[in-house]
Image (cartoon, rainbow, N blue to C red):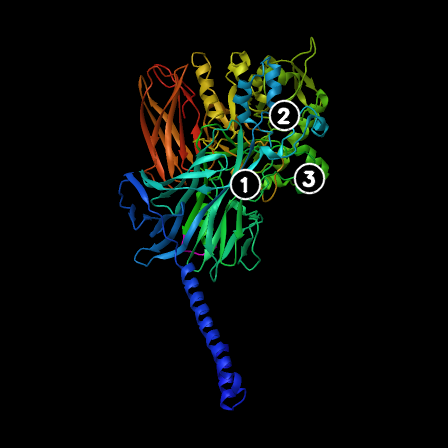
Amino acid sequence: MMCRALSGFVKNLVQKKRLRAISEDVMSKVRVMMAAKRLVGLMQVAFVMFIALPAKADQLNCNLTEYKTLPRLTAQVADDTLVVTWNGEKNEILRLRMAIIDGTPTIRELSIKRMGSPWVALVTNVKPDFRVVSGFRRMTEQQLQPLRELGIKITPGIVDRDKWEAFWDAPLRVPGFAPAELPRVPPKEPFANQPGLPRQPEEISRATAVYEVRSCDVKTNGERLEISFPGVALGVFTGRLQYTVYAGSNLIRQEVVAKTEKPSVAYKYDAGLKGLAIQPGSRMVWRDTSNTWQNYTFGGSVNRDPVPLQSSNRLVVIESPRGSIAAFPPPHTFFWAREIDVNLGYDWYRKDNTETFSFGVRQPETEADPADIGRGSRDMRDNFALLSARPGTWQRMPVYFYVSDTPGQATLNSALAYTRGDHFKSVPGYQVMATHFHASLVNRLQQLGSLDAMLPDFEVIKAAGINIYAPIDGGGPVPNASEHVKNLALYYEVARLHSDKNFVIMPNEEILSGDLSKKLGGHTDLLISHPVFWSQGREAEQPLVEDDPKYGKVYHLGSPADLIEMVHRENLLLYMPHPRSKGSTGYPDAIKDTSHFLDADYRGIGFRWGMGLDGSEQRLCDYRCLPLLDDMNNWIAERQTPAKYIQAISEVFQQGPGDDVYANNPVNYVKVHDLPQLDDWKSIIDAMRRGDYFVTSGEVLIPSYEVKGAGNQRTVVADVEWTFPLEFVELVWGDGQHTDRQIISATGLPAFGRHRFTIPFNVDGKKWVRFAAWDSAGNGALVQPVKLTNTATSAGDAH
């Protein structure tokens, strides 16, 4: 338009015989300018058309030999594009079109439609986004100390075996605490005094995934399809990118599956999608830790770094006028053990430029400072252990996407159904019990000025669906016997004041210090059936129990035999809370032949993922807890003692609003019809003694289980309920020396299912058996082992 105006103006000058001498020269220049302008315009149009067109795909060589066509799940390759179509939820059909562009697997299009409606593309031309930060795994002094006390020589082999179960390790905390700085660490808890400190900056590496993909593999696995792209480098890891879709579900699992040969790798990862177009109506949607809806509409400046979101339930959603996609991590395997459940921000977005953005899930690099969040002065930042990567193991680094044509809030709620709303479901005939909390109830209430004050711990526990809350504070690590008894009285009073008809506080205790603890070996949880008063230490000629004018019976415990006697008289139980880790490293192996461990009321061990969580584990606590459970039952196979059991524990201290309680705390479903009354927890103790409970992360439930029959031919019958698509169920057994198992694939079963498994079982030569069920996200549930005889199931051992 400017050129036309200038041309008209010049022509007018010529017509009026003004500037006639230069008119031809000016007109010549104007014509040049107009031609140039037209050329620029054409170039701009061509450029816009160029950037709007998708990049040319590489040749796609897909191996389909393990692909099997299913009515609800199909795959085909055409024009160097893999097209996967599957039936989702609620009469929806989903389609994923994938290609390789410049060596990078790319989602050409992710679409959804209702039956009889046209396809709606939610995203186009987006790519996976993976980042990893790795550090050096060290064994901790907390682990070394009990081994030294056992007289075990600390060799490189011992360190290499046990370092993976470190709890108080923080590989990304540089410079760390050198020995000269140890006065900052609480006495008797030299957690930070690790060999090889201080950490060095060069121990830490940060990397983004690099793709050199040239092919893909498509595999049918039951009612799911697994699409793998080998040729991925992610820092110290090399492996493949994999997508999994599930018939009957709107879920997509995107993950890097990779391994390293380095000897001491601890790591964290972030995962998501990048290159998503900012369209009119695009926005991020999430709920904050107060469960208030929040959103971001990309009106801010371009981000240099990812924006962390402290979103409730670990969920964030991208929304457009056509639909939305939720991103979230696996609910439990994403987390290593910590001592506080503070939400550190597990989701992120990043506005990359004015046209595109990225989003996904993340792990932070540091623990929150407890003082900053009102949790006292105890320094827990040394407990940020990261995931473990044993050399040569295939580490899985997944993120889940839930795809829907509904608005963001509805999509978030649909995705949340996979963790039952982060709530432990009520099951008739069972009570939900969470144990082993370091809550410091008495001290905190005294600081508030009244034992009647309300602590936030009670509220967040109840909100998660837990109705039996079992801390292990007891009388505290007080050496003075009278003070211990006095503190126990206050502890029991707190339980009375804050229990209710639908919520019970069961005031247990952890024996973790003092002479009695050393004689027992490792740490010991004492589960009580009613208030019992006791103290460590028993003088010569002092009776085991004395009558106190204020407290009644008071036990004086000077030996494991004294403790066992009290346990028998008062109907109590013992468990080792965190075996082969922390202050119980080397245990219970070192006490497996002692009379107190072999006692029928020393019921077993604790179950808690995260102490050495390895990304290659198929089951929660697959390296530490479950093999030990099987070892113990082989140890006692020929002895006249019941099977050893496992109970779910926590390990956290104070809790408050916004904390991620569900993700970090497994529970026990105890077969008790009615909640017990004040000061009477006998029904809980009796059920746990019988093994009438199952352990779960929450997504998988086993409300009924039985070993039927007599003689060699038995049948295991188990009712299982789940949310995420189930992976497998298993029978595990031992012959007194070795452990074996039968794995029954369940990949043909849909999400949100129920099934009765009936499994014939020959008991010839077998001494015990147990059943477990695990889903595709690593969540699971297991029942207690059943000890077998030649004629029938051992009395009291079967459900």
Residue on which the image places disc 2: 194
Q: Which of marks 2 and 3 is in front?
A: 2
Amino acid type of disc 1? Gln
Across and down, in percent, residue 632 comes to 47, 18
What is the distance, in whole Å, between disc 3 and disc 1 at their CAs? Answer: 21 Å
Mark 2 closeness class: few <14, some 14–19, many ≥20 residues within 10 Å: many
Question: Which range of residues does the magenta coloring cover?
Answer: 404-408
Up-down relation of residue 561 to residue 25 (above or below): above
Could you say where residue 68 lies in the image, as x and y percent from the top left? 27, 40
Which residue matches tag 3? 371
Q: Nearer the viewer, residue 186 or 30?
A: 30
x 40%, y 45%: residue: 103
Q: Is residue 171 magenta?
A: no
- If you read the primary sequence from the N terminus, does the residue marked by circle 2 or circle 3 appear first? 2
Name the outermost residue toward the bottom: 16
The answer to whether mark 3 and mark 1 are in CB contact below 8 A is no
User: What amino acid does circle 2 point to?
Assistant: Gln
Q: x, y (%) of residue 682?
A: 53, 26
Instruction: Name which quarter of the figure residue 715 lies in.
Output: top left
Q: How crowded is the residue under tag 3: few (<14 C-alpha within 10 Å), some, or many (20+)?
A: few
